[in-house]
Image: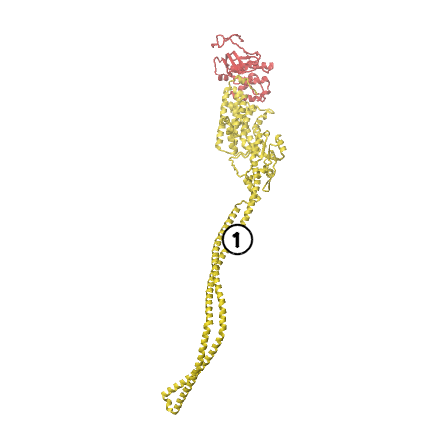
Amino acid sequence: MDVEGVSIVARGITATGPEGIVFENVDARVYPGELAVVLGEGGTGRTSLLLALSGRLRTVAGRIEIDEAPRRAGLVRKVVVPARLSPGFELDGRLRVREAVRERRITARVSAQDVDRALALVGVDVDRAALIDELYPDDRLLLAIALATAGGPPGIVVDDVTAGLLPSGRNRVWSALRAVADTGTTVLASATEPGSEADVLIRLPYNVVDFGDDTGGLPLFSSTAGEDLR
Amino acid sequence: MKAIYLAWLELRRFRGPWRRFAPAVLILVPLLYGALFLWSSWDPYGRTAQVPVAVVNSDRPADHNGEQINAGEQFVQQLRTTDTFQWHFVDAGTARSGLEDGRYYFTIRVPEDFSARLAQSTRSSPQRPAVLLTRNDANGHLAGIMADAARYELQNQINAAAYAAYARGLYGDLGEVRGKLGTASEVSEQLVQGTQLSKQSTGALARGLSGVRDGAGRVSGGVRDVAAASAELDDKLSSITDFTGQQLPATTDALLDASSSAVADLNSISGGAAAAQRQAGGSAGALEQLAQRHPDLADDPAYRSALADARRLASTTSALDGTARDAQRTAAEAQDRALALRDELAPLQEAANDLAEPASRLRLASAELTGGSGGLTQGVNALVANIGVAQTSSGQLNDGARRLADQVRDSLDRMPPAGPTEVARASSELGTPSAVRATTLNSADVYGRGVAPLFFAIALWVFGLFAYLLFTPLNQRALGGRTNPLSIAVGGLLPAAVLGVIGGLVLLGAMDLGLGLDPVDLPSAVGLIALAAAAFTAVNHFLRAAFGVVGGLVSVALLLVQIAASGGLYPVETAPAPFQALHAVLPMSYLVDGLRVAFTGGEPAHLARDAIVLGGVLVGFLVLTSLVVLRHRTWTIGRLHPQLEL
């Protein structure tokens, strides 16, 4: 697998909702082919941050650079594909596996071989006639990851990796994500606890990255309490 | 293709023992909504016979011209024959309590003075009889409106009852008048005949009197002649009396003298004659003797002439002698008669004297008779003149009687007949003296058929509303992927729209087969319902896709506004101005309008316009939904954590 991953840099991004600030002044840096994990308790804006980093949520402050430059959100959405965002992008539990595959092939214009390869890559082998709801939670998540990975996108987004999974399942998923990242695809994940395979951790509610002098960009916000987690 | 596959996938979500029926149930939503409502109120005005209504008759019969008027009872009888409502004929208390506790929807009370007022209606100051209708809106206002609709029907029945009573009074009188006119007609005919006779007899009388007048004239002439004759007679008798008294005796005496002298004379004549005869005889004998002696003389002419003369003289004197003796005898007889006459003259004189006196009387009487007959003639003349006048008058009398008879007959002919059938017909015609004949173009016939377009529209809208409780407006995975927005919008619309079209057609079929909707233009109805189902679903699709749960609320609000503004029940002109303004811009107005044309008929141009508008709504909202897809590719926190969730 040789996918050219995407690099994502966020500087002091802030998102607000009807009830006020969702996350504020968050920094992030993800290099191509890295597995980045957004860590935080429920309600700290993990999904929102994933959406924002994948071009799916408008931020009110800060800047996001994709492959070292600000890009149009539409373009970002094309290169960073969601595997699961909850809520908003989840496999429909009442479809059969083959229907979900077909749906993915329709909406993402990927071939059956792409899907098969992706399934093999993440190490999931499910009955195509089974209902998604009938799958084990880890199989279900792995299927979603495989469908997102099919066709080799530069980046994927996986929300709530650990939710509802037993430790064995979690390890399976982390391994799978590691495998995906190893093909070159940048993986943005979120979890309530850090996986052993993570390359980068982005902690919520506050994540500060010391960009140093090598960024070439203009720091929009002064980095106060720097903590390099790398 | 993508859209169709997305739609198919959306439908594939409904699996499992119960969920698989969800789309089928969704199809029945329009049917449930539209059919149940329309079924329940398909023909409420045709089933008013089931509505219990109390009728109270408090009327007291009234007298009119000796005839009893019982209009209240008549009205009640009339109601019994109709099944406009379910009549309960009860007393006032029952009616009141029944109305109050909802057993009756309204009550009809005939007041005590109903007949009395009617009885007065033929008099100088008529009073309108009234029937009291009491409603209780606690039993439902529309029941009251039904009562209002029935009011005109009741009015007709009351009018008919009232008129029947009224006509009995009036026509009863008229019948009497008619009878009298009939008699008058007969009498006037008799009068005409009588005056005709009188005219003829006065004519005859006049002619007779003319004869009398002529006769009287002749009598008068005769009388005058009689008078003249009697006067003459009197005169003559006087002269006769004079003659017999004086001249006759003198004459008789003279006659007697003359006859005596005649007798004496005649005696002497007779003696002379006898002497002459003898001499003549002797002369004749002497001559003959001569001839015998001298025979020669016998032939001598002179001798012969002398002999002939002598012989003639002898015979003449012989005859004279005879005559003288006869005359002597006659004179003697005359003398005898003159003597007898003288003897008879005295009685004659007496008789002549006796005759003179009656003749005088006769003369006097005939004079009087003349005078009388003159008077008689004058009288008869006057009578004739008067009879002329009488004749003229009786002619005029006859003409007058004839005219009178004509007029009476004419009046009789013009009098309406007043038999029971005529009264009945007149009361039905005149009880409602005028009628409104209504013609309806594109008649809906029954209430349900008339309001069906509105309920179809509501049903289709409600379907759209329900559909997206079940269906996902937009495929989130497609939204997160690269599928083009229009495909996603169509893919989200199609499953619901297809079911909506099916549901609408199921509703149409059920209405047609079950209730007899019988659209006049079935293809248009099918097409319009399909189009509207798609369009309404598209609107709801957009609302749900754009605003989520709030969109559902907006849809409900729109539904209510459209029901109010579509003009599906009452004419939109009766609605307040805001509704009239909204009427033209809300899609339901066009569906209601178009379905009216398709169901019960109307202007095809409307149908075309409505189809274009609904098609525009469909396309327009699809485009709007596509724009929503574009916008939704970027999440918002509001959408991530909705403030409202079902």
Q: How many marks?
A: 1
Chain painted in yellow in the figure? B
The residue carrying mark 1 is B194
Crowd band around label 1 with a 10 angstrom C-alpha radius: few (<14), some (14–19), many (20+): some
Task: Identify the image quadrant of residue B267.
Answer: bottom left
Residue B275, horizontal then vertical, whole percent: 42, 85
B27 relative to A124, above or below: below
Q: Nearer the viewer, residue B48 or B497?
A: B48
Q: What's the residue type where badge 1 is placed?
A: Gly
Q: Nearer the viewer, residue B245 or B642?
A: B245
Q: Nearer the viewer, residue B542 or B596?
A: B596
Color encoding of the figure:
by chain
Residue B30, horizontal then vertical, whole percent: 56, 28
Task: Identify the image quadrant of residue B25.
Answer: top right
Residue B593, horizontal then vertical, whole percent: 51, 30
B61 relative to B470, above or below: below
B269 relative to B178, above or below: below
Q: Is residue B42 visible?
A: no
B620 relative to B148, above or below: above
Q: Chain of mark 1?
A: B
Q: Is residue A136 visible?
A: yes
SS state under label 1: helix
Q: Quadrant location of the C terminus of chain B?
A: top right
Residue B370, horizontal then vertical, whole percent: 47, 62
Chain painted in red in the figure? A
Q: Residue furthest bottom?
A: B293
Q: Nearer the viewer, residue B563 or A14?
A: B563
